[in-house]
Amino acid sequence: MSDPLRKAPTVNHGESTAGCLWVVATPIGNLTDISKRALEVLANVSCILAEDTRHSKRLLNHYGIRTRLRACHDHNEAEQVGWLCAQLESGVDIALISDAGTPLISDPGYVLVSQLRKRSFRVQCVPGPSAIVAALSVAGLPTDRFVFDGFLPAKSAARQAALAVYALEGRTVVLLESSHRIEACLVDIVSVLGPQRRVVLARELTKKFETVLDGDAADLVQRLKEDPDQTRGEFVLLIEGVTQPLKDDQEVLRMLQILMAELPLKQAAALVASLADRKKNEVYKLALSLK
Ligand code: SAM
């Protein structure tokens, strides 16, 4: 490989002649969102591990890159470790990409990278797009602290239980959702976190039909009903964290109801008391009134 690619700091390999695994971010929609360095690495490695080789071929063809592709997905990733170590030991460099965005982020690659690190192989990143960070950058929700939880469960009961965890979450919550479930997921947000919880839907980022909708959860349910086109494509769903302590008894009771569905009464009361900045005993009594 050419020298410029070698400038990034190396990790504990000393005089080793072993190759490097390059973890390369690729576009999330717009094919021109790829760095010069990413293209250089992809053109110069001996093989590219890709989630779906046919899908990635389109990106490589667009840039005239002829590097060999090899499939690496959730179902065969563990089997690739031996092959990959042998390749790196022979001195060649390999790249890892996913269908879109940054590998390992809700995508394959964790097994490979963790195993290579344990064996002290060099792993270097070529950073670039990720739907999660792109969505945060335009959502207008606080970004100083956020929590990313990937995809929620597909079935409503399990999804509601997962959402209940965010009842007291102060950080912005970032989730991925598919077009089949986006409406049902918003309906669950309304019932578990309340109709007024602020939500942002970042859809088809960097693509032709990019839209960012924001508003109360109940509002967004309505907007999707009125304009079904807004349920098409790929989504990042962001939920605003709880910004104010619970204001009145009514809000305290609603929060208790949500939490008592998942937690023992005493634990739910203690959590709500700390969030509402109230005495534990007082909230415990309100919780008992719900029994
Ligand atoms: N590793 C990828 C990344 O860093 O962006 C994420 C992979 S995850 C399997 C794919 C999901 O990301 C999609 O189902 C969708 O929820 C979201 N996503 C991907 N591209 C998107 C886009 N252009 N606009 C909005 N969401 C997108």
Image (cartoon, rainbow, N blue to C red):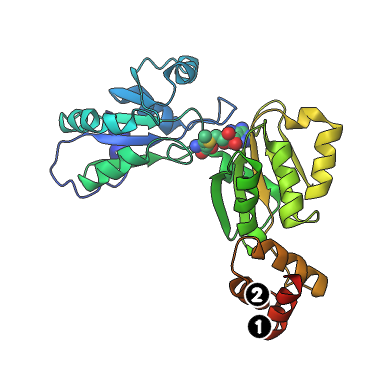
Question: Left or right of 173: which side holds 20?
Answer: left
Residue 290 place in picture, x, y as percent: 75, 70
Question: Left or right of 31: which side holds 247?
Answer: right
Which residue is label 1 attached to? 280
Callout 2 amino acid: Ala
Mark 2 or mark 1: name the one nearer the start of the chain: 2
Say which of 7 and 38 sits in front: 38
67 lies above or below 272: above
266 lies above or below 28: below
Which residue is label 2 attached to? 269
Residue drawn where x is 47% and y is 41% of the image:
105
- Residue reaching furthest left? 15
Instruction: Please tell me whether mark 1 sits on a helix, a strand or a loop.
Output: helix
Q: Dividing the image into 4 quarters, which one contains the C terminus? A: bottom right
How many numbered markers are drawn? 2
Q: Quadrant of residue 73?
A: top left
Say which of 112 and 180 sits in front: 180
